Amino acid sequence: MVALMAWENPSPADAALPTAAHNALAPAGPQAAHIAGLWYLIVGVCGIVFTLVLLAVLYAIWRAPRATETTPAALHDDNPRIRRSVVWAVIVSTALLILLTVASIATDRVLAGLSLTDAIHIDITAHQWWWEARYDDAQPSNRFTTANEIHIPVGKPVILTLKSDDVIHSLWVPNLAGKKDLIPGRTATLTLQADREGDYRGQCAEFCGYQHSYMAFLLRADVPARYQAWLEAQRQPAAQSAAALESRGRQVFLGGNCAMCHAIEGTGAGGRHGPDLTHLASRESIAAGTLANTPENLARWISDPQAIKPGANMPPTDLPPDDLQALVAYLSSLP
Amino acid sequence: MCLRCLKYLPGMGRVLAGFAGLCLAIALSGCEREQRAFPQPADAKLMPQTLRQSELQPGQPAQPVGRGEHLPPPDYQAKYENNAYAVSQGRRLYRWFNCNGCHANGGGDIGPPLMDDRWIYGGEPADIYTSILHGRPNGMPSFAGHITEDQLWQIVAYVRSMSGQLRIDTAPSRSDNLQPAEPESRRERQDMRQSAPPKEHS
Amino acid sequence: MQKHNAHQPLDQAAQLEQTWRDPPGLPGWFAAINHKSIGKRFIYTTFLFFFLGVAIAGVMRLQLAVPQNSLIGPDLYNQLFTMHGSTMMFLFAVPVMQAMAVYFVPLMIGARSIAFPRLNAFAYWVYLFGGLMLYGAFLLNTGPDAGWFGYVPLAGADYSPGKRVDFWAQMITFTELSALLEAVILITTVFKLRAPGMSLNRIPLFVWSMLVTSFMVVFAMPAVMLGSTALLLDRLVGTHFYNPAEGGDALLWQHLFWFFGHPEVYLIFIPGLGFLSSIIATFARRPIYGYPAMVLSLITTGFLSFGLWVHHMFATNLPELGKSFFTAASMMIAIPSAVQIYCWIATLWTGRLNLKTPLLFALAFFFILVLGGMTGLMLASVPLDLQVHDTYFVVAHLHYVLLGGAIFPLFGAVYYWFPKLTGRLLDERLGRLQFWLFFIGFNVTFFPMHQLGIQGMPRRIYAYAAETGWGPLNFIASCGTLLIVASLACFLANILRSRRSGMAAGDNPWGAGTLEWATASPPPAANFIRLPVVHGQEPLWDMQRHLSEHGQIPSPSYVEGVAANFRQVLATTPLDACPDSRPQFPEPSYWPFLCALATTGLFIGSIFTPWAVVWGSLPVACAMIAWFWPRHVDRVTHAEQEYRSDGA
C-alpha cells in the first residue's frame, strides 16, 4: 500500500487540453434544453417549498417561549388551527408533487419524441478506457472507425448505438443529453441533436476501473459542410508520406508492438484492441481526452503511458530515441 | 464451563502461535497476490529474435537451445505466477493476441491443447517463454519484437494456469465468455510430462 | 399481581443486580449477554468504524483538493472510496441504528432484557468479525476496489482478479446476517416484552421507527445476501449468474443490489426520524403533534421504499413506462416525509423550547434533510436523473440525505442519551462548538458538489484535468472537510472528558417523558428495579400530570410477581400489552462468541475454497449444539422456581 502511494505525477500536461463545454445547464441541443427547462421548474418549486419550510421552522423557534428541563410538559392542546395548517400543507405538497411528476413524465415523452428523420447512425463501443466510434453508411467503403472524437452535423438528429466491450460504462455529454449506460450483453440507443456549433466534452459516468477518471471524449458539432469534409477525410486510408523520417516511423509502428493493438487503415496494422490511429493527427487530444495532441505528449504517452494513466492497457514501449522520434513524426503525419 | 479451558492456556499458546503464523503466511501470500504492478518503462523491453526456428525441435534435451537465456527473472514467482492481476492480464493478452485462434480456450484446435499434461516443448516457464518468443515449427508464430517482456511473462503465467500449475487463489476464475471448461482456478493440477513430437501430417 | 407498594424491600435491587449482571472479569466479558453491555460495545464499534470511514474520506478529499493530484493513484483510490462507502453503509449507518436500539428499546418499553439475549451477543460478534476482516484485508492491500455497489462485470472474476471483491462480498454476508438477527430480536422485543399498558398506540416513536426498520431489514437484506452469494459463487466456482454469454445478466446484480440498496437508505433514515421525535418531544416540552399520522407515515415510508429501486438504474435501457412508474413512486415517498416534517414544525410551533445541543442537531435536520429531499425529487425524475446520475450532484444529495436524515439526528441522540449510557452529561459548550463546526463544515464540503455535478464531474474519479475547471470548488469542498474533522475532534474530546468528569446527570436530566428516564443512569443490570406499568404515551409526563391533578400517581404503577432470583421476564400480548406469560431468559454464555468465531472461520475459508463450507460447518454445528445444550439450572422446573421466588 505504501509503495502504491509513490505514483509519478499522472499528468503534468505541457500543452493545455482544448476547451470543450461541459455543463448540463448550458444546453446546446433540444434534449438538454428540455431537461434544463424541467430543472428550472423543479428548482423553482422546491426552492419555494424549502424556503417556506425553513421560514416556518425559524418562526416557530422565534415565537415559541423558552423552557428548561423542569418546565412541566403540555399534554393537551389540540389546536384546530394547527391541524388545519398541517392538513393544508400536506395537501399543497401532494399537489405540487403531482405537478412535478406530470412535468417529469411529460418531459420524458418529449425527449422520446425527438424526430429521427435523416438521422446519423454512429455505433459507439466503450472499452476500458476509451471510446470507439463506427460511422455507418449504406456503402461499405464509406464506413470507418475512429476513437475518442465524435463529429456530428448541427441540426441533425443522431442515433448512437451503445455497446460495451468489457465492463459497464456510461456515455454522457452534459450539454447535449442525459447519459446512457453501455452494458455488456445489451445494446442501448441514445438520441441527441446539437443545435449550436461547438466542442462538447463527454466523459464516462459509470465507474469502470482504474482509468474511469480519464475516459473522456470530444464531441464536435459542425456546420454540415465542414462535417461532410471531415467525413470525406476520415473515409480515406492513412496518408503515406514519402519523407524518410515518416517512413521509418511507419516501419517502427508496423514492426514493433504498436500494430498488435492499433489499426491504421491502408497499412498492415489491423489491431482492434486500441483506438484506430488512421487519422490520429486530426484529433485534438490523445489518451481518451487526457493529453493535448502534441508530438511531445505523444512521445511521453508512447514511452511511459502508465505514468499518465496508471492501469491503462497500453504497455510502455522502450524505443531508441531516433525510433521514437520517427514514430511520433509518422503518427503526427496522419491527418 | 469455558473458564476451565483457561488452565490449558500454555498449550493453547502454542496452538495460537501456530495459528498466528499461519495467518501471517496467508497474509504475506495475500500481499503478493493482490499487488497491482503496472508496467514501468523498465518492463518495456521488446525481446528480439535470437534463434532460428529450425533450431527449435521437439524432444530436445532438458536444456534446449536458447532456454538458458530465457530463464524467468528472479522475481518471476512473486511478480507473475503468484500475482492475480498479472495472471489476469495474461489471460486478456491471450485473447487479444489471438492465442485462442489456434489453441482455443486451452483445449486445442489447430494448435496443441494447453490444459492437458502433454508439453511438446516443455511446460516450464522458460520453455513456454521460448515457444512464444521464437515460435515453433508447424505454425506457431514468433512474437519476438511484438510484445514486451513483461507481457510475455504474464502470458506464460496464464498459460501455466490453464493446466492447473498455479495456486488456486491466484489462478483466474471464470471469464465473461462462453465456458468450454472449468475455470482455471478449478482445474486439476496436471503433472507435466514431455510428450512425443506430433506426427508429421503427410 | 399489580399493585402500588411504596415499601419495596431494599434487597430486591441487590438480588436483581446479582441475577442479571454479566459475569465479571475478562472471561466474563466474552460471555456477556446483557443488552446494555452488548449495546454499548455495538455503539462503540460502529463509531470506531465511522471514524475510520471519515479518515478515509479525508484522504480522498486531500487527493481531490487540486487537479491532477499525485498523492494517491487509482489503485489505492478505488480501494479507498469502496472502503468509505462500504464502511459507512454496512459497518456504520445500519448497525449504529440497531446498536442504539439494542441499548434503548428495552429501556423505552420497560423490559428487563432484550429478546434472545444470546443471539444478540452472537449478532454483535459476527458484525465485529466481519468489520475486522474487511479492514484486515484492506491493510494487506486486499481492500475491495469495485465500489460499495460492486457492479458486475467489473466486480466479476474477469475484471477484479484476486480476492479483493470476495472479502467485500463476504463482509456483506457477515453484516447482513448480523442485521437480520438484530431485526428478528428487535421485532420480538417490541411485540412481546413491552411493559403492561403500553399498547401499540403508546409505543414511543423511536421504538416505532425501529420496528418499521426491522421489518424492512427482514425483507430487504435477503436480496443483497442472495446477490453477494451469487457473486461469490460466480467468482469462486464459476457459476454464471452474471455472465451474459452463458445466459446470466449483468443487470440482475443491479436489481438485487438496489432492491436492498434503496430500502437501506430508509433503514438509515427512519431510525433518524425516531431520534428526532424523541428529541423534539423532550425539548419542546410536549408530545409530538399528530402521533397517529407520524406512525402511519413511518409505515408508509417503509412500504413505499421497496418501490423505488429502479431510480438507481434510470440510465440502463429499461422500458420507459416502467421508469415512469418508479418516478411516481419516488415522488410519492416525499409525502409521508412531508407529513412528519409538518408535524414536527407544529410541535415546535406549539411547544416551549429548551434550546440545548440535542435540539440544535434536530433543527439542523430541517435545513439539511429538506434540501437533500428536494434534490432527491430531482433524482426521482427520469430526465433530470439522466443528467445528474453518477455525478457529484448525487454525492451531494446522498450526503445531505444520509447525514441530514441520520447523522445529525444521531449526534443529537448521542447528546440526548449519553447521560443514560454513562450517568454524566456531555459538555454543552463543546457540544455547541461541535454543532456549528459540523453544520458549517458539512455545508461547505457538500454544497459545492451540487454545482460540480451540474458541471459534469462524474463520481468515483481519482483525479481530474485542470482544464475541466473543477479545481476551485473541489478545493472549497476539501477545506470544509477540515471543519468536519475539527468538529469530530470536539465530539471525541467531549466524550472522553465528560465520561470521567461530566456533570452528574441523575435519572432524568432533560425532564423527558419516556420510560428509559424512569430508571437510574446508567441503568442497573435488570433495567428497572420495579417493572413499570404504563398509562399513556409519555408515561413520566402522564404520571406528573396525574399527580398534580389527582394528588397521586396512577395505579397500578408497577408490576409485582416477576422473580428476582432468576432471569424471569414478563411477556405481554402484542397489541394491548396485557401480561401474558413469564418466560425464563438464558444465562450468560461463551458459546455465542465461540459460535461467531466458528462462523467467521467458515465465511473466511469459503472465500478461498468451497470445501470450507463443508468442513467449516462442523465447528459451527458443535458450537450451536453446546450453545443450546440444556443446563442444570435450566432443568429446574417452573414450579420450583415459583416456589423459590415466593420464598424470597
Image (tube, coloured by chain):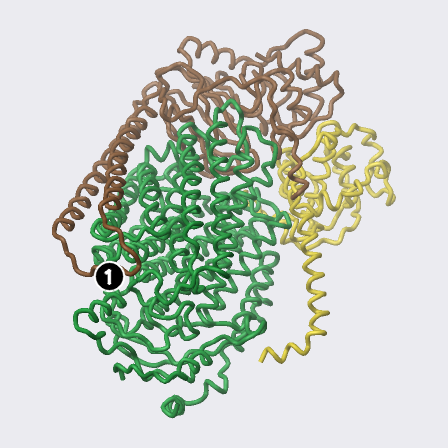
Chain colours: A brown, B yellow, C green
Q: Quadrant of residue A157?
A: top left
Mark 1 secondary-structure assignment: loop
Q: Nearer the viewer, residue B101 or C526?
A: C526
Q: Which residue is mark 1?
A: A72
Horizontal relation, residue A106 to residue A13: left or right: left
Assign the C terminus of chain C to one quadrant of the image: bottom left
Horizontal relation, residue C227 to residue C324: left or right: right
Horizontal relation, residue C359 to residue C50: left or right: left
**In the rendered image of this protein, does residue B1 appear above or below residue C265?**
below
- Residue at image point 79% right, 28% down: B49
The amino acid sitting under disc 1 is Pro
Q: Nearer the viewer, residue A165 or B182?
A: A165
Q: Nearer the viewer, residue C86 or C229?
A: C86
The mark total stands at: 1
x, y percent for residue C499: 49, 60
Is residue A238 something one can see in this rendering? yes
- Residue at the extreme left: A80
Assign the N terminus of chain C to one quadrant of the image: bottom left
- Residue at image point 26% right, 48% down: C341
Q: Quadrant of residue A12?
A: top right
x, y percent for residue C369: 34, 44
- Residue at image point 41% right, 62% down: C419
Is residue C263 something one can see in this rendering? no
x, y percent for residue A181: 43, 35
Q: Nearer the viewer, residue C231 or C296?
A: C296
**In the rendered image of this protein, does residue C444 appear above or below residue C524?**
above
Horizontal relation, residue A240 to residue C115: left or right: right
x, y percent for residue C54: 51, 46
Chain letter of the residue beneath label 1 in the structure image: A
Please tell me how crowded label 1 is: few (under 14), some (14-19), or many (20+) other residues with Cα within 10 Å. some
